[in-house]
Amino acid sequence: MANEDFLIVKASGDKVLFSEEKLRSSLKRSGADDKLINQILTLVKEELYDGITTREVYNRAYSFLRRNKPVFASKYKLKKAIYELGPTGFPFERFLSAVLIYTGYKTQVGKTIVGKCVSHEIDVIAEKNGSIIIIECKFHGEQGRNCNVKIPLYIYSRYQDVKNAWQKTTSNIKQPDECWVATNTRFTKDAILYGNCMGLYLLSWDYPNGNGLKDHIDRLGLYPITVSTLLTKREKQFLLSRDVVLCRQLLKDSFYLDHLGVSDKRKSKILNEVGRLCKI
């Protein structure tokens, strides 16, 4: 059986044909050169079997990268690292807020504002050049779950209630100019059709095409600390609890590693790893 004929099982349970090109593309995005990519492709294809899961394919490629090029492994695990911001959506909201701050926005997270009918806790409020953006985040802690049309439907109704508050005098923010829906997964076709029809800005892992969440992160070097291959899960959770959600923030606030009791030698390795990730 040719490699292209093997069916692989996605996290959603759907089965698709193995695509060497997709794997090559994801490895290239990590920074791996053609020689390293070909080595990994050879390894993966030798171990393919009908019904293999995307997670197994990922694990094989990730393990090889981690042994040979740890920094590339960190970039390669970006999507998984976003899931590791959970289990609640709050760290994802802070992560998105931090990304926006580094691109020139002023942000507030978890602010309650008064609508015409009821009050709403808004995930992120961003301001830039006098424009106010209301951002609602939908975080999924499990792979294979996408945002269906119910999400933008619900968020658009909240946005309208906030906008309609300007008929009253009780609103406690400036008039919003735009509403975003951000998710760490993907939107369904109907969700995209509805969101675009109603003028919502949709931001997902790979949407808009070429300007999705992964593109912003790679382009700006704004990687979450959860991409680190050297920090333990406990250490990552400690840093997240201190609002250190980006590798860039850890470079600035490296004293937190001292609080964690990290040795000087290991601290140097960690900072070297995150420092290389931040270079763009």
Image (spheres, rainbow, N blue to C red):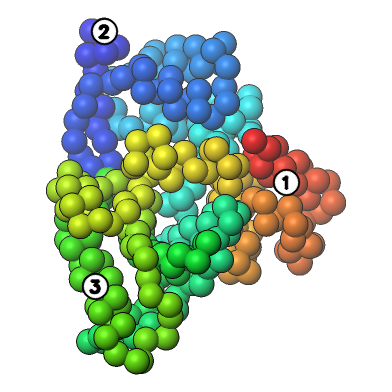
Q: Which residue is mark 1?
A: 270
Quadrant position of the N terminus in the picture: top left
User: In what element is the residue under mark 3?
Assistant: helix
For the residues bearing labels 1 and 2, Cβ distance under 8 angstroms: no
Q: Which residue is mark 3?
A: 160
Q: Is residue 43 above or below residue 1?
A: below
Is residue 51 visible in the rendered structure shown here? Answer: no
Tell me the mark number nearer the camera, choosing from 3 and 1: 3
Q: Residue furthest right?
A: 264
Q: Position of residue 161 (x, y in %)?
A: 24, 78
| Residue 169 horizontal side relative to residue 90, left or right | left
Residue at image point 56% right, 66% down: 106
| Residue 117 horizontal side relative to residue 214, left or right | left
Type of residue at label 3?
Gln
Q: Position of residue 43 (x, y in %)?
A: 46, 16
Q: Earlier in the sequence, mark 3 or mark 1?
A: 3
Q: Position of residue 122 (x, y in %)?
A: 38, 74
Circle 3 crowding by C-alpha within 10 Å: few under 14, some 14–19, many from 20: some
Residue at image point 43% right, 80% down: 173
Is residue 97 visible in the rendered structure shown here? Answer: yes
Q: Which residue is mark 2?
A: 2
Circle 2 crowding by C-alpha within 10 Å: few under 14, some 14–19, many from 20: few
Tell me the mark number nearer the camera, choosing from 3 and 2: 3
Q: For this rendering, which residue is in front, 11 or 271?
A: 271
Type of residue at label 2?
Ala
Q: Quadrant of residue 189?
A: top left
Quadrant position of the C terminus in the picture: top right
